[in-house]
Structures are given as C-alpha cells and as structure tokens.
C-alpha cells in the first residue's frame, strides 16, 4: 500500500474534545463500546468526532471503518468493557496511516475533517481520502464521490465502492439508476444493486466468479438432496427481512434443488435470470429452466409457467400451449390450474364452453380451499349455472371464501347478511364486512355502503361525520349525490352550498339523474334565503327559550319576534293549503323539512313550559292561551281531541283502572295540525286498564321524535339535535299514514280499533314492521296482528 509521504512529519496536534453522544437509554457512548445501529447492525465505537455543524461516530463494521452521522436516529449499547479507553492519539493514527493502513487513513482524514485532536485541514483530508480510495477502501471511494459536483464522476466513484462491496454505495448506485442521476435510467441495474444492498457481501470478494464456479460444479455433478427442503431453505433466505442471509448461498441452494429436478426451484431460477436482480441477466439460462419446468412433475410450477404463456409475460403469448400446461398441472393436483381451467370452460374463449365442466373444476379447486374457486363455485350454485340451484351450499362457499380474504366473497356475504333472505338478517355483521372491504381492500362500493349505513344508522350508530368521510373517498355517482345532500343540509359537515353544487355536478356528469333537480334548487338563491329565514327565526327562538332565566318569557322573547313571523305565516299557509287533503304530501324538499324541523323544536321547548311536572319553568308567564295564539299567528290549525287515539294524543299521565277503554280525563295542550299533516300531538291525562296502558311506561318512556320533553327524551338524541329530521304523519280521513318518506308507510284502516295495523308492504315480518314504523306513541300494547309499537330493541325488551 502507498504511504502518506505528503503528510508533515510533525503534525500539529492538541488535546481532544470531549464529545457527549447518548444512547437511547440516556447513557453516554465510550470508545470501544459494542453498539447496535438503527439498521440492526452491531459495530464497535472507534472515535467520536464533532465540529460546529455536526457530530458523528467512527465505527468498526468488521473489515473497515465507516461514519455514522448522529441525527434523530436512536442506537443502543450492547456491551461495554470494564476499562475505559482513551481517545486515539493523532500521532499514533498518523503513524499507522503512513504505513498504508487504509482504516488508519480513514480515521486520520475523519479527524482532520472535524478538527478534533488535530488541526482542521480539508485539503490534506481530501488527499488522504484519495490515497485511501486508491488502496481499495470502499468507504473512501464513497465519501470521495459525495464531494464531487460532477454527477457522472460521483456515480463512477460510487460504483467503484459498490463493486468492492460497500453497501451504502450499492444503495446510492441503485438510486442513481432509478432517477437517472449521473447515468441513464436503468431499471435492471436499479433492481440489481438494490437487491445486493439487501444482502451481505464481504468486501473484496468477487462474488460473480465464486457463484459461477460453484454453479458449474453443481450442474456437472448434481448432489443427492432433499430437493423440496433445500428449496424452502433458499426461499427463506431470499425473503428474510429481519436477519439478511447470504444471497449467494440461496442461489446455490436453488441450483442444487433444480439440478435434482424440482420444478419450483427451476421456475424460481428462470425468473431470477430473467430479472437480473440477484444474478446477472441470462435469458438463455432462463429459457432452459422454463423448458425443464414444463417437463417436471411439480404441478404448482407447471401452473405458473402456463400463466406466463397465457399472459404473454417474458414470452410470446400462446393460449393453446397455456391450456395444455394447465391441464397437465390440474392432473398433478394444482388448484390454481384447476381454477384457471374452470374459467376457460366458463368463458368459452379458447375452449368450447361447458358450464358443467367449469363448475366441476371450480369444485375441485374449492376442495383445496382456493379462495376465488370457492367464490366462483358459489356463484354457479346461486345462479344454477352448471349445477342445480342450492343457496345454502352457495352461502357456505361464499363464507369460506370470505374467511380466506377474497374481497368479492366479503362483499357477497355483507349483501347476504344485509338482505337476510339466505342467511340471518344481521345489519351489524353486514356493516362489519362492508367496513373490512372498505378499509382493508379499498373497494369503492363497500365504502359507499359503509357511508350509507353510517348516515342512516343501519347496523351501526348514526354518525354523519363518518358518513361524509366515506362518501368523499369512493367517487361513485351516488356517493357524489349523497355527499352533495349532506353539504347542502350541513349534516356531518359545515353547510356549504358551493361544495354541494360541485358534488351534484360530479354526480350529474356520472349519469345521476336526480342531481339535475338538486342543481335547479340551488340555482334559486332568493327563494332559498326567504325559506331559510323561516327556519332561522324558529332556530333563534328555540335557543332563546332554552336559555331564558327571567319571568317574562312572553314579552322578552316571543313578542319581540312577532313581526318576523308574518312571512312564516304566509309560507306555512301555502303549505297547508296544498290540494292533497286525502293523501300524503308530495316528497318534501330540504327547505320544507328545515323550516318544519326548527319550528318543531321550538314547539317542544314551549310544551315543556306547559308540563305540570316542570318546576324549572313554572316561574315563566307563558300560558296555554298565549301558546295557542302563537301557533295560530304562524298559520297552524288548533284541535282538541274528544277521544283518545295515538295519532292525535300523547300520553302525559295515566290513571290506572280495572277495565274499559282508554278515556281522556284532561287535555293539557291541544294538537297542532298543518292541513292534514300532524305537527304536534295533544298532551292528555287518561284513564286506562293495565293491559292497554301501563302507568310508568306509557307516560314515562322516551319519545324518540321529541327533542325537549322532561322525563321523556333521550339524552343521546339531544347531541343530535342539530340534525334535520322531521317526522311526517298524515290524517287521510279514513286512514292514517305514518312516517312518510322516513321509512315505510304504515296505514291504520279501522278507526274503531287504532291498533289493528295494515302495512302497505304486507309481507313484512313483525321485526321489519317495528324497524320501519318508528311509531310515535309511547304505549305498551299486545293486540292481535301486532306485537309492539316500540321501534327500538332496548325499548321492546323492557316492555316485553
């Protein structure tokens, strides 16, 4: 090795700096410590260097010294000797460097770079770096290259270091080939050097020569071996991520297994020679191995080779030859080949169509738990294609396929649980499966279903914000439309008409016809402002009443808004005078629901002031006459029921009797109608036998559709009180329509017995009727034809 004759014989030295560098546990590093880098590599600390700008460790990685810059990376102490080692003396390091020790050269120029223990001198440091590189020191080549402004020269120096075996240089060279930095873009070389950087090669070893010699030896004299076990061992080395093994050994093991005739090893080697990642590219060797695979008895390898010819991957596409290979692989028991042949017979593109034979192949692969074969066999059984219809067996196949993470099967099982016509009706399971398909596999249709179920509270608690997030991520016509509605109404997000407009336009471009109507509504800003003012005045009154602490509510709050209700009176009068006295109103717009919703909340607040058990508001001066005059002023109709009916009456108090019918004792507040629309039911005290109304249940249970009612409302509902949700029930003269547009319509035809129910959808089960009805009356009944009026499971259980 060359000596550093250019160094001054007497170096200018001075006492070393004490550099404090801490491990992850807070203890300070010392010379000769055995430590572990963030990469997992164990190294010895040689020196600690510091200048005004940076700090680093000089480390011994086995055959050479290297830098480790101290930043945010954490490293830890492995072992420490009892004796404390002093910092190396500059004169001693320089003496070894002059004798040609390239590690000493590396150490010396590091000290000069940082000026730690020796005079800082970048020029001499650079000369020492060049001399170390000439001696074949990989890190010196690499660090010398990092100083070059000429990118081509930098790449050349990095390549020298990489070929010697310096792993950071290998990664840098791979990056250069990837982004064409100082060299032309080359994916083959990029993959080659990245793969070698992930292995461990000793510096100075000509790995290609060693590998070629060993392979030639193996091919001339194949060794007796357990070919399958050796193949598995080779693959373990290749895919190891935590403890990187010797790549050369893996290639050698593959060659041994391939020489013994193992098709999977031959297939893997053919792929490696084509890719040129771990070995230099050799297409002739790859072709030779592919030919051997075709003659092997390894069904898996033959099936993979068939797929290559079917796809035209690395070879000219040849569907006829691919089918021949699939047939051979299927006979050898390969499930992938059996599934592929099933597809071929089902599609009839390269083979004569035969759905019965297709189902037979699907079933063979399904017995070996092939996920897609299970799903395809299930579809055949569901549709009767190639087999008799058997929905129960199809559901079993779908479930097994879903358990094996087949996304189509997961969606299918979600649909089945949602529909409940093949398996149990279970919205919770359906939601869970849709969410897996959405979150794990990012299926757009699944994201839409999750959003819809969050929006409507199906199988999960209603959460508008979550619905908005999922609608915003699936990019489907219907999701754009639903998202537009939610931005328009301010559900789960801030109300924003412009954002709503953008979503409706996207929906329309994607073919959603209803989006045109919503865009037309948004194009009339003046009408929107007038109608929204009706909602705003009631919205303000609701909060003013709720927060009022004085004793003159009528004068301080209501009369001050009296003039503002004139426009509202005209609006509500137009609504109630529609020509639909004996049928439900046409579907409402958001504007109508908004106005009715806020008016209803204000009404609930005022009713609470009239409740006899509300001491908080007894000091206010709101009377029943004033309450009635307000809603007459706004344009509503006031009615006083003469006999009890759940459509017209809300039970406030029950006086229990031995027998008879339900009898009204006192009406505390009247019912309020808007044409034939029920706006607010009358509050009544009643006498009733226990089997019709039970005291403590009928007068104390929660009223789901009420927002403010002492002892009767749900605390969890109050958190949703800004949701636009107004229930529409209609008196149609000879019958009643409940919850129109809020679920399924429910009609009562016999006014003498209001509890005998006739659903429009007469095939619905009792549970479906309960879930769709969401009945308003807080009563407990057990009449023929209907088991309970409670809309929610927890209420149903308590009453039962």
Image: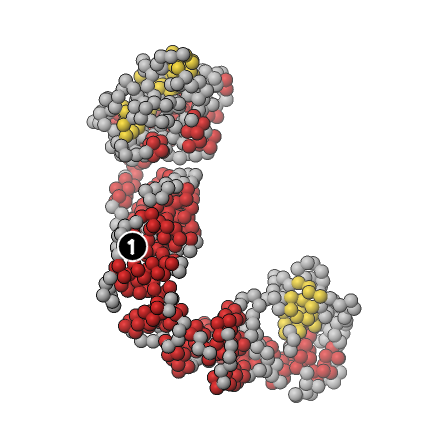
Image x and y of residue 184, in percent:
43, 77
Q: Nearer the viewer, residue 14 or 348?
A: 348
Answer whether residue 49 is visible to the viewer in this image.
no
Image x and y of residue 68, in percent:
63, 69
Q: Nearer the viewer, residue 591 or 118?
A: 591
Residue 116 position by quadrant: bottom right
Residue 52 position by quadrant: bottom right
Badge 1 element:
helix
Left or right of 530 on screen, residue 222: right
In the rendered view, tell whether residue 222 sits above or below residue 377. Answer: below
Q: Nearer the viewer, residue 93 or 218?
A: 218
Q: Quadrant of the C terminus?
A: top left
> Which of the colour schemes (rainbow, by chain, secondary structure, one colour) is used?
secondary structure
Q: Residue furthest left?
A: 579
- Rendered residue at 57%/68% (across/down): 243
The tally of labels here is 1
Sort mark 1 into few (<14), some (14-19) or many (20+) by Cα contacts within 10 Å.
many
- Rendered residue at 40%/40% (across/down): 459
Image x and y of residue 367, in percent:
38, 58
- Rendered residue at 37%/23% (across/down): 782
Image x and y of residue 232, in percent:
50, 70
- Rendered residue at 51%/79% (across/down): 224
In the rendered view, tell whether residue 534 sits above or below residue 211. Answer: above
In the rendered view, tell whether residue 492 sits above or below residue 721. Answer: below
Q: Residue furthest right?
A: 83
Answer whether residue 703 is visible to the viewer in this image.
yes
Residue 601 position by quadrant: top left
Q: Identify residue for label 1.
A: 380
Q: Nearer the viewer, residue 508 or 461?
A: 461
Left or right of 367 on screen, residue 219: right
Q: Quadrant of the N terminus?
A: bottom right
């Amino acid at each position: 090795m060359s000596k550093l004759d250019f160094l001054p014989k007497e170096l200018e030295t001075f006492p070393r700096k004490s550099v404090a560098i801490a491990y992850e546990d807070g203890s300070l590093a010392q010379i000769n410590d055995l430590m572990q880098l963030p990469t997992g590599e164990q190294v010895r600390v040689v020196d600690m260097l510091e200048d005004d700008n940076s700090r680093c460790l000089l480390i011994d990685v086995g055959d050479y010294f290297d830098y480790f810059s101290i930043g945010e990376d954490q490293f830890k102490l492995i072992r420490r000797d009892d004796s404390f080692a002093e910092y190396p003396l500059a004169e001693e390091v320089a003496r070894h460097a002059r004798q040609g020790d390239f590690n000493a050269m590396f150490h010396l120029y590091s000290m000069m770079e940082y000026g730690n223990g020796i005079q800082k001198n970048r020029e001499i440091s650079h000369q020492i770096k060049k001399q170390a590189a000439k001696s074949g020191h990989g890190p010196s080549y690499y660090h010398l290259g990092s100083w070059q402004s000429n990118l081509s020269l930098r790449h050349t120096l990095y390549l020298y270091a990489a070929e010697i075996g310096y792993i950071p240089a290998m990664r840098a060279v791979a990056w250069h080939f990837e982004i064409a930095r100082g060299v032309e873009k080359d994916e083959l070389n990029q993959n080659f050097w990245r793969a070698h950087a992930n292995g461990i090669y000793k510096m100075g070893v000509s790995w290609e020569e060693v590998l070629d010699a060993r392979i030639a030896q193996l091919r001339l004299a194949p060794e007796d071996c357990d070919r399958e076990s050796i193949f598995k061992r080779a693959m373990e080395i290749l895919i190891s991520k935590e403890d990187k093994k010797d790549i050369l050994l893996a290639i050698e093991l593959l060659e041994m297994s391939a020489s013994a005739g193992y098709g999977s090893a031959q297939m893997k080697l053919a792929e490696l020679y084509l890719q040129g990642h771990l070995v230099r590219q050799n297409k002739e060797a790859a072709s030779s191995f592919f030919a051997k695979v075709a003659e092997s008895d390894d069904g898996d390898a033959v099936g993979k080779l068939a797929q290559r010819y079917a796809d035209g991957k690395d070879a000219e596409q040849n569907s006829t030859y691919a089918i021949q290979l699939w047939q051979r692989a299927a006979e050898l028991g390969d499930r992938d080949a059996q599934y592929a042949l099933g597809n071929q017979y089902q599609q009839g593109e390269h083979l004569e169509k035969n759905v019965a034979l297709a189902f037979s192949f699907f079933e063979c692969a399904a017995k070996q738990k092939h996920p897609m074969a299970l799903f395809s066999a299930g579809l055949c059984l569901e549709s009767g294609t190639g087999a008799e219809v058997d929905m129960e067996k199809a559901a079993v196949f779908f479930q097994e396929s879903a358990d094996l993470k087949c996304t189509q099967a997961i969606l299918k099982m979600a649909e089945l649980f949602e529909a409940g016509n093949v398996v149990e009706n279970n919205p919770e399971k359906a939601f869970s499966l849709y969410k897996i398909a959405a979150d794990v596999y990012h299926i757009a249709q699944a994201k839409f279903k999750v959003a819809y179920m969050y929006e409507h509270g199906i199988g999960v608690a209603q959460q508008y914000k979550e619905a908005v997030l999922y609608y915003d991520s699936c990019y489907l016509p219907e999701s754009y439309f639903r998202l537009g509605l939610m931005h328009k109404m301010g559900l789960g997000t801030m109300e924003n008409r412009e954002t709503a407009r953008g979503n409706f336009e996207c929906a329309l471009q994607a073919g959603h016809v209803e989006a045109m109507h919503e865009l037309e509504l948004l194009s009339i800003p003046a009408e929107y402002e007038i109608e929204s003012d009706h909602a705003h005045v009631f919205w303000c009154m609701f909060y003013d009443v709720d927060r009022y602490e004085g004793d003159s509510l009528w004068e301080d709050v209501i009369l001050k808004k009296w003039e503002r209700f004139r426009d509202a009176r005209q609006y509500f009068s137009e609504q109630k005078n529609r020509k639909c006295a004996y049928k439900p109103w046409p579907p409402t717009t958001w504007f109508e629901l908004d106005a009715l919703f806020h008016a209803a909340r204000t009404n609930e607040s005022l009713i609470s002031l009239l409740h006899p058990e509300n001491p908080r508001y007894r000091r206010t001066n709101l009377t029943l006459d004033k309450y009635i005059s307000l809603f007459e002023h706004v344009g509503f109709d006031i009615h006083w029921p003469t006999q009890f009916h759940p459509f017209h009456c809300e039970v406030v108090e029950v006086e229990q009797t031995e027998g008879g019918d339900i009898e009204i004792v006192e009406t505390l507040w009247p019912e309020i109608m808007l044409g034939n629309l029920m706006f607010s039911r009358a509050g009544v005290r009643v006498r009733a036998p226990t089997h019709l109304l039970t005291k403590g249940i009928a007068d104390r249970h929660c009223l789901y559709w009420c927002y403010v009612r002492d002892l009767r409302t749900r605390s969890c509902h109050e958190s949703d009180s800004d949701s636009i949700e107004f229930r529409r029930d209609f008196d149609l003269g000879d019958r009643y329509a409940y919850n129109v547009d809020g679920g399924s319509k429910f009609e009562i035809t016999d006014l003498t017995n209001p509890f005998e129910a006739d659903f429009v959808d007469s095939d619905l089960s009792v549970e479906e009727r309960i879930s769709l009805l969401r009945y308003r009356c807080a009563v407990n009944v057990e009449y023929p034809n209907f088991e309970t009026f409670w809309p929610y499971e927890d209420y149903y259980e308590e009453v039962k």
